[in-house]
Amino acid sequence: MTTEHRSLRSELEALTTEAFRPELAEIDTLPTLDIARLMNAEDAGVAAAVALRLPQISAAIDGIAARMAQGGRLVYAGAGTAGRLGILDASECPPTFNTRPGQVVGIIAGGPAAMVTSVEGAEDSAELARTDLGALGIGPADSVVGVSASGRTPYAVGAVEHARALGALTVGLSCNAGSALAAAAEHGIEVVVGPELLTGSTRLKAGTAQKLVLNMLSTIAMIRLGKTYGNLMVDVRASNEKLRARSRRIVALATGASDDEIEAALTATDGEVKPAVLVVLAGVDGPTAARLLEESGGHLRAALTATGG
């Protein structure tokens, strides 16, 4: 074993997410139901671990939302499971919040192919992260979230270090205390979920924790940006029949209007929910609703207040 391999082994052995649990050494001999109960019990503690980091998460969200309000982008960077979760979250923002193309982006070590297969060595390259961010033209208006269960992945750490040097807001999300990733970022978020059921399989509790935090970062930032009205997704993009039905239901829930009024309002606004709600509640036409929303920075509640609604 080389000195480099010994060093890496020692580094991994020091990580909480890599710790071996001798009490589970014979888990493969248990009945399936017992293993399922063990996994379920493990997962039950993840939300509590996230709860301990809510102040740090909230501070990061406020910073992200402030920059996005000025036209900046939200970019996730990670390798393996962490990178895939970032891309998943980013891909769900356009249909849910009608974000513009490229407003929320996920990049993964090894590129698109790494979404479905392992790309050997990619996660070990900080230079690759710098190249990927360079292709996006990252600048001071943007926010970059590095995601890594271990908190030591060179790709994630390199992404955060490079983005911070360019003036972007940076967030480091990891599942180990005292991580290099959190230290490199302006906002460090360390959700310590403990050793995994299967030693080192961070697609389990660590992956669940990362998904919960990414849900918060994007969803609450979008709430702050006026992408919702109460708990209604008024910026939903009606790109299929299910979403068109949902659009009609959202207008109904927001306004209490009749089916005919809802159809008329959606027709007047080319199917856009937010201005349709304004058409109904403020009694204005489609173009006026669009203008009022633009003047209110896209915030429906503010536009309604401006009309006395």
Image (cartoon, grey):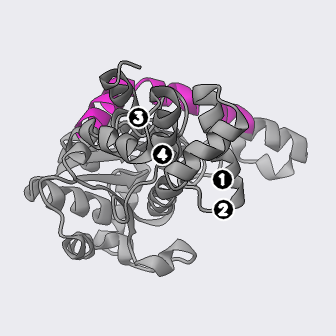
> Residue 125, percent across and down?
28, 73
Q: Is residue 1 visible?
A: no
As drawn, 86 above or below 215? below
Asked if the residues shown at circle 2 and circle 1 are in contact, with their CB atoms under 8 angstroms apart, the answer is yes
Q: Which residue is mark 4?
A: 235
* 42 in the magenta segment: yes
Left or right position of 268 against 52? right
Label 3, residues with CA under 10 Å away: few <14, some 14-19, many ≥20: some
Task: Where is residue 231? Give x, y as percent.
Answer: 54, 29
- Asked if labels 3 and 1 touch by Cβ distance under 8 angstroms, the answer is no
Mark sitting earlier along the chain (2/3): 3
- Secondary structure beneath disc 1? helix
Q: Amino acid at mark 4?
A: Asp
Q: Which x, y percent locates residue 288?
A: 36, 42
Residue span colored magenta:
40-63
Q: Which mark is residue 240?
A: 2
Q: Residue under circle 3?
A: 223
Distance of mark 4 from mark 1, alpha carbons? 12 Å
